Image: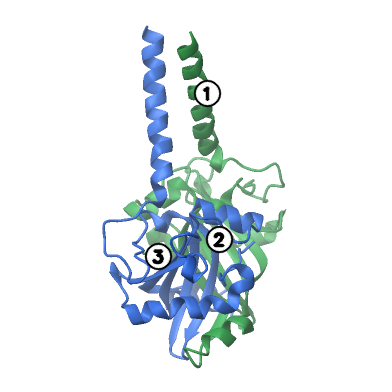
Chain colours: A blue, B green
Amino acid sequence: MKRIGFLLLAVATLAGIVGHMAHASRQSDGDSAPIYGVKIPDGYRDWKLIAVKQLLLEGKSNQLRAQLGNDVAIKAFKEGTLPFPDGAIIAAIHWTRVPSESNDKVLNGPFPGTESFVVGSPLNVQFMVKDSKKYAATAGWGFADFTGEKPGNEALHETCFPCHVPAKDHDYVFTRYAH
Amino acid sequence: MKRIGFLLLAVATLAGIVGHMAHASRQSDGDSAPIYGVKIPDGYRDWKLIAVKQLLLEGKSNQLRAQLGNDVAIKAFKEGTLPFPDGAIIAAIHWTRVPSESNDKVLNGPFPGTESFVVGSPLNVQFMVKDSKKYAATAGWGFADFTGEKPGNEALHETCFPCHVPAKDHDYVFTRYAH
């Protein structure tokens, strides 16, 4: 009986770990974005990296960006699965891009003329959530944009889907996996 | 006995999953970098994101960069643990930065004057491995630089540690966690 007790404990412990993993995509208790009702998914900052970008928005706001994906999204990116399967979520984190004088001071010794830029303050985070039934009207994707914990307004969220239509051939996703 | 058989199977399966996780930091069978003997860690591309950077190297090579960390490194970054504990590994992936005309075409509709840049081809990947005994001569850090699977030469690797000395107050690590 001792051995069965140990096995039960081992199963319970390991099931707990796996259960925790399975819940990695659940949503927070915070506000929902308008139109789509998307909330900030718990733990998204720990998702795997899809790619990085730099964007000079309207010639003014210089940004560094990272796209992360939950496990469903990452698997689809790696295997080239299109359309993305239900359950896929892509997070795009946007920060200000700021010059790093301290890095430059070091780097200009061995590498003269080097300019380096790091992330400054967080700007906003956007999500694309694939649910082909719930979001059938927008090609299966729900969109959300948050500044901190606060979702953008309805007018902002009305711009998401039309802007993504030109990426229709890649299931409305602009980002490609960075190998 | 049927139930015990099921439990054994369940333990074996779950232990396999956990065992796989525990091995996430093991090294590949490829070449070792000179001086430090560091190999490319298996699965590093799936590590969690520390931060992103942009670098214009010597005024010529424009790069987008991502720093990823294994679980030991990420925990230390999040909790502000200094020095980093043994077992921490930081990976820095460097890509060329290329303009995205197709993204610009879309973005310049709603956001005129926007310029976007995405990752092009991979350049090199660098690793910092913390082992306070093995790398005692270099403040506990082993360094490695690979282009594809091929490590850089000894002269290159001799430059790693001296270049990181100005970051001594942050345990020789330039990168900060991007919140």
| Contact? badges 2 and 3 (CB < 8 Å) | no
| Residue A11, quarter of the rendered image | top left
Looking at the image, residue B124 lies above or below residue A23: below
> Are the residues flagged by discs 1 and 3 from a single subunit?
yes
Quote the CA–CA distance across marks 2 and 3. Answer: 14 Å
Tag 2: residue type?
Answer: Ala
Frontmost of labels 1 and 3 is 1
User: For this rendering, which residue is in front, B67 or B119?
Assistant: B119
Tag 3: residue type?
Answer: Ala
Looking at the image, can residue A110 be seen? no
- The x and y percentages for residue B28 are 66, 43
Residue located beneath label 2 in the image: B92
Quote the CA–CA distance across marks 2 and 1. Answer: 35 Å
| Residue A14, quarter of the rendered image | top left
Residue located beneath label 1 in the image: B12
Residue located beneath label 3 in the image: B178
Chain designation of label 3:
B
Q: Residues within 10 Å of mark 2 (few under 14, many from 20)?
A: many
Q: Residues within 10 Å of mark 1 (few under 14, many from 20)?
A: some
Residue for point 28% across, 67% down: A149
Residue for point 49% across, 85% down: A56
| Contact? badges 2 and 1 (CB < 8 Å) | no
Tag 1: residue type?
Answer: Ala
Tell me which numbered mark, 1 or 3, is placed earlier along the sequence. Answer: 1
- The x and y percentages for residue B36 are 61, 48
User: For this rendering, which residue is in front, B62 or A162?
Assistant: A162
Secondary structure found at label 1: helix
Chain designation of label 1:
B
On screen, residue A164 versus residue A119, left or right, reads right
